[in-house]
Amino acid sequence: MSVMTVGLTVATIGAPLLLGLIGLLMPQRNRPDAAALGVAGAGVALGAVTALLILNEGGSQATMHWVAFGDFNVTLTTLVDQRALYVALAVAVVAFCVQVYSIAYLRDDDRYGPYAAQVSIFTAAMLTVVFSGDLIMLLVGWEVMGACSYLLIAHDRSLPEAPAAAVKAFLVTRVGDVGFLLGVIILGVKAGTFKITDVLANVSALDSGTVTLVCLLLLAGVAGKSAQFPFHTWLPDAMAGPTPISALIHAATMVAAGVYVVARLFPLFAASATALTVLGVMAGITLLLGALAATAADDIKRVLAWSTVSQLGYMMAALSVSAVDSAIFHLLTHAAFKALLFLCAGAVIHAAGSNLMSRMGGLRKGMPLTFVTMTIGLGALVGVPPLAGFWSKESIVAALSAKPWLMWAALAGVAVTAWYSTRLWMLTFFGPQRVHGHEPTIAMMMPLVLLAVPAFGLGMGVFAVRDDLVHLDAELILPLGLAGAGILLGWAMCRKRDPIAALPLGAWIGGGFGLDTVQRWIIVEPVRALARATRVADESGVDGVVMGIGRLTESAGAGLTRWHAATLPRAFAGVLAGAMLLVIAGVTVGLW
């Protein structure tokens, strides 16, 4: 790796990290400097990644010795290749748009300073994961992302649900991260190194049982970060965070990290048929569950959150059939159109004063730019040609022909995605005008225009370079027909009102089919009961014995105190009684 490549890689990660740490030291109300630091960090990262894309001609790696445990060396390694650069570019673009958008979106927020700093550190953590060339560096970025997500989801302290959502996200992902940590340790020890290229080169030397165990442990962490069944329940609740954070987490950073890690370590997963089967089953359930839940949600952000769950299922499904390029292709297009959709949703929420689509309607008249850009985003999500999502989703569906049951699940997801996307479009922009919409400020509009460009044309650009990813033949008729059927169904159902909301099971479906309740009774409540029992045992048992001994000692001391404070005759009688006891004891011992 050349000196320039090393410097640009360090700048990509280091600029948002350093400026974010500086931002944490600044006064919370210092908005101009906080905004400058946040935008500058993302801007430097974006510029450095762009320069790396121009200069890079292939994979390059740089290693620095960190620490040694006997003969076992731990290094810090960066690995820069085309796949990493494309993902890093998506992260940097979305982070830049989020920082600019947040200046206006959080203009009345007294805690904007730490918010902007935390976004910068969060961005640096994701970029660390992307450019990691060893498992330890990857793990550091992975863990910092988890901590930052907790802080950012809980940012709005005025919302009572925000702290609870942050705790839920942190705990659910931490459960998976325990497995991820164990997998990293076992893999590094067994391979004799944590350097990713060396680990993958030694996969054939590992026994199949170890490979399967490591893959399943890593998948636990991946399922947590990327919201895969059964660890998906935290993601819709994370909507309690500010809308720009939803765009960042759901589009290009935390949820994409799991997909990227599987892609980066794919030769390891490819060596375990069991792991790929588990990944495929998990993906199939996730993509259908998320899509169906989105059909009944009333909160516009929760619809998009369930959509994210579903689209992540598509990426994992592609990985389960070894279509790594298709998975990364969809990750990139999804980053563009989902970030666009969340930021458009933020503009709509600002105008309507509510997250609920039932309180919106007719907004296309007062918000023409938001209407056009959100239409592009929804069209890309559905897979309408020639928008970005069409190319990447078709690439996945074609790859899934190797597993027909998973392909049919993906095709069903295409129809349902078109249905809930049309429902969102109709309820938000058409029908009776319940509120008078207005376009947001220029700082919020600019990111919408910027993200609409890749949401529209990214797929065509990639297809022009890699025409092997999508085969434009008669097989496209079925997914396009299903998407068209979903659009017609959504239009027919919602052109006058939303029939889903009136269904007795509407809230149950929109809440994720009651899986939160199942988790609460199977996991949360038993853990709480165990905690209560442990507390009672500790307080009544361990503490009870200690406190009992203390009270007994205190009572004995009080008794002796009373004897010492006795009147003279009583004290004299006590002395004589003691003397008599000593005499009797002495005589008894002497007789023995």
Image (spheres, rainbow, N blue to C red):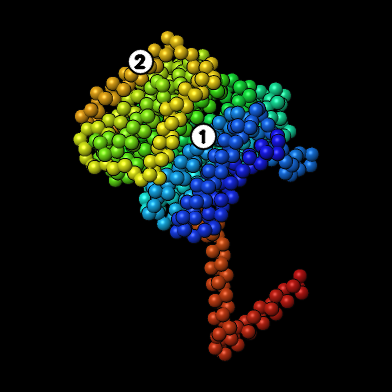
For label 1, the SS is helix
Q: Which residue was labeled with disc 1?
A: 90
User: Which residue is at the far bottom?
Assistant: 568
- Neighbour tally class for label 2: few under 14, some 14-19, many 20 plus, Cα within 10 Å: few
Q: Amino acid at mark 2?
A: Gly
Q: Which mark is residue 481?
A: 2
Residue extending furthest toward the right: 71
Question: How many other residues sit within 10 Å of disc 1, few (<14), some (14-19) or many (≥20)?
Answer: many
On screen, residue 441 versus residue 328, left or right, reads left
Tell me which residue sits at (65%, 28%) in the image. 57
Looking at the rendered structure, the kind of residue marked 1 is Ala
At 54% from the left edge and 58% from the top edge, which residue is drawn? 25
Where residue 365 sits: x, y (%)?
Answer: 25, 36
Pick the quarter of the image with the C terminus.
bottom right
Which residue is at the front of the view, 118 or 162? 118
Query: Whole-percent x and y of residue 364?
Result: 27, 35
Q: Where in the figure is residue 572, as x and y percent of width and height?
A: 60, 87
Q: Is residue 231 visible?
A: no
- Is residue 192 or residue 519 the one in the foreground? 192
| Picture disc at residue 352 | none
Give me the C-alpha separation between circle 1 and circle 2. Answer: 30 Å
